[in-house]
Amino acid sequence: MKVVIVGNNVAGTFSGQNLRYLNEDVEIEIFTQERYPYYTRVKLPEVISGKVQTNDLIVFKDDWYKDKKIKLNLNKRVIKIEPHQKKLFIEGENKPVTYDKLILALGSVPNIPPIKNAREMVGKGVFTLRTIEDTVDIKNYIEKSKAKKALIIGGGLLGLELANQIKDSNLDTTVVEFFPKLLPRQLDDECSAMLKEEIETKGIKVILKAATEEILGNGYVTGIKLKDGQIFEADIILIQAGIRATIDLAQNSGIETNRGIVVDEFLETSEKDIFAVGDCIEYKNQTWGIIPACMEQSKIVAASALGLRKIEYKGTTPKNTLKIVGLELTSIGIFDPSQEVGGGWDILKKADKKDCCYQKLVLKDNKLKGAILFGDNNAMSFVYKKMEQDVTKKELMEILELYIYKCSNCGAEYDETKMEVLFKDLPDEWKCPSCKHSKEGFNKN
């Protein structure tokens, strides 16, 4: 049997690896329009600042593909699928490629919002970052134009890390974000405010509630105009405003699409023997653009393509663990219960603004439902292991190193899980609210 995979991103590459793990004999062939074997996109911004070289990004070299008996075809753009004949057509080639099973790992492309002149100015000072080629284009433009001021449109994960590396390239750097806070999908208001403050200490300006109306320039960019009339000068503009699922190939081949390529619980598309995986899929009206979803789906799609339909996809709990502006960040599950319907939520929180450390665990019915760990990831393994599991408040207090202090005079308690300020951060002159006993008269329970 021959399985063809279109796309060598994380979803496509690990689908190939899982196919080989399940079956030593199946023929596996990957086609990609990329010029490079599988590489990590997380460190792409560091190529621009020169901290990382292009070759350092490549995760699997040629030997890996040979060892796994996977044939990798670089610089091959698939332009058409004929599902009933089980054929693929490659740009510039007359002979079609045949398959028994097909896995579409088409990934996603950067979203360019409907900003006046944005698309017209791409390559003339406006850039998006998704591939190694993008980093080369951005780096070359900065050098050739002798750019001094940079604007990043979008305060998401990649946008902020990109801003950090652009700043390290000695450019005056400003982030403009449409939403009223940074990382609205990963952080609550308090942690987002801490992150903004930390970013600004690095010399990066952050403008919130900023809707960009127009890219300014005549031939080459000179800045942006916001909808409120404010104008910001810039020599280069980097748009990092989310992603869109790549669906054109599937759509043009008669495969059902919506926001993504529509799949069932086994990740099979509307066409028999054609499967889809990763950023490009839509399942139960939901799309995912996160690595954990790609990894989870790659195991299911490999089994499904081999006819081993034992595992059904049930969706992926949103989780991110990465380093942003040099600080560790983990966000998983429901981190802001105020946005959820119903009550019964219990929150344990530890905020240390001085050391830029924020830890928050969210429970409901004694089950861990979500967490934010920022600046300190020591609790990460516990959180991943215990998600949706029964936990006790005592367990969580130990993990977060939160304590209850008791007044030796009147027995009043200072419970750090319910207070905005840790006991150690209270001023020396602080006194017991009940009996006015000194801070030194409190003992840790």
Image (cartoon, grey):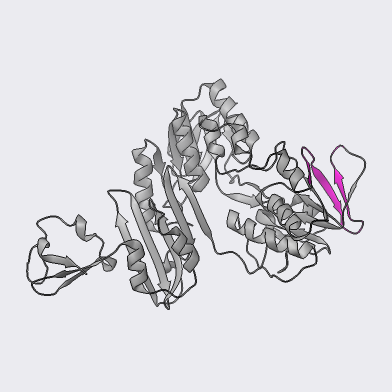
Q: Decide which of 226, 368 is in the foreground and name it.
A: 368
Is residue 115 visible from the viewing direction of this image? Answer: yes
Location of residue 342 (image quadrant): bottom left
**259 within the magenta span:** no
**88 within the magenta span:** yes
* Residue 404: percent from left, percent from top: 23, 68
* Residue 47: percent from left, percent from top: 55, 33
Q: Quadrant of the N terminus?
A: bottom right
The answer to whether residue 158 is left or right of residue 39 is: left
The residue positioned 62% from the left and 66% from the top of the image is: 315
* Residue 361: percent from left, percent from top: 39, 65
Q: Decide which of 19, 300 is in the foreground and name it.
A: 19
Q: Decide which of 48, 404 is in the foreground and name it.
A: 404
The residue positioned 61% from the left and 59% from the top of the image is: 293
Location of residue 60 (image quadrant): top right
* Residue 321: percent from left, percent from top: 49, 53
The residue positioned 17% from the left and 57% from the top of the image is: 426
Give the tally of numbered discs: 0
Q: Decide which of 268, 144 is in the foreground and name it.
A: 268
Q: Quadrant of the C terminus?
A: bottom left
Is residue 218 visible from the viewing direction of this image? Answer: no
**Residues in magenta, as a range:** 70-92
